[in-house]
Image (tube, grey):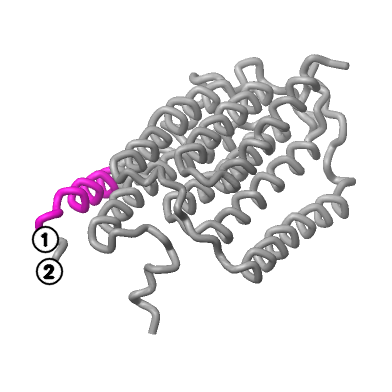
Amino acid sequence: MDLTNIAFIAFSAITLICALMVVLARNPIYSVIFLILTMFSLTGHYVLLQAQFIAVINIIVYAGAIMVLFLFVLMLMNMNASNEPNKSLLWKVLAGFISGGTLITLLVIYLKNMGDIPIQPTNNSALGAALPPDFGYVKPLGKMLFTDYVFPFEIASILFIAAMVGAVFLGSREKRTDN
Amino acid sequence: MNLIGFENYLWLASALFCIGLLGALVRRNVIILLMCIELMLNASNLLLVVFAKMFGQMNGHIFVFFSMLVAAAEVAVGLALIVLIYRKFKTIDSSFLDNLKG
């Protein structure tokens, strides 16, 4: 058995178990920790898929910034007490049916269209074109980002300014929240 | 070298998405709702990377990049809103936040 296959199976198992534990953990702190583990195993998947730059920024942005923000807010508000009341049993069963039905629908769609999906990709791309040797590196990605996608890039910077101003404004008005 | 079929990634990403959907439907803590949305976003990111490898083009990586940017902005504003809600109502249980219900 190939080492890549073993790594894929291990990373998939860690991803799914940690994602389930995010949902099932009673303590929100544990949920954040399991979500960080999920991010790390997804980073392993990105490395397996030759997306090195995406793997690095997945660790930096998700596990480094977003998860720390979650942990910071949880500990700031002192909500690690697991006193969350349960939803009703009917709603739980209904939610299980909705998400399970979505999963089954997706699987049926995949199985119906399985002929279009290449089963065993080689080192080349599945559709016949060879992968470029610098696939997933920073240089071609940066070139593409600043030529073809330069307009969405600037729009994203405007979005970030708006988000930053909004977060600072919302976080700094505690004196006026009671009227 | 890489003998993993792409359909395995399809199944993994759909399972991840459905776990996130289940959490978003079942849990009542608003912060855990945000985290389940992050799970669903990550499932779609994984599929974008898989399709980028499958087609041999790197446009999917750019889309993952922008998706991460939008997720970061969303979490920043969302957590600021959650802090405000907690200060005003002293709870972040989503079933108590029904002031807009007619």
B8 left or right, relative to B15: right
**Please, which residue is most extreme toward the left here?**
A175
Task: Classify 10 Å Cα crowding around label 1: few (below 14), some (14-19), many (20 and above).
Answer: few
Foreground of the two, A85 or A111 = A85
Vertical placement of B24 versus A14: above or below? below
Q: Decide: marks 2, 1 in contact (CB < 8 A)?
A: yes
**Residue A34 seen in the current view:** yes
Left or right: A40 with respect to B55?
Answer: left
Q: Quadrant of residue A19?
A: top right
- Residue with the mark numbered 2: A179
Q: Which residues are magenta?
A: A161-176
Left or right relative to A172: residue A138 = right
Residue that label 1 marks: A176
Q: Is residue B91 left or right of residue A85?
A: left
Question: Chain for mark 2?
Answer: A
Q: Secondary structure at mark 2?
A: loop
Q: Position of residue B79 (x, y in %)?
A: 34, 48
Q: Residues within 10 Å of mark 2 (few under 14, many from 20)?
A: few
The amino acid type, in three-letter code, at marker 2 is Asn
Q: Quadrant of the N terminus of chain A?
A: top right
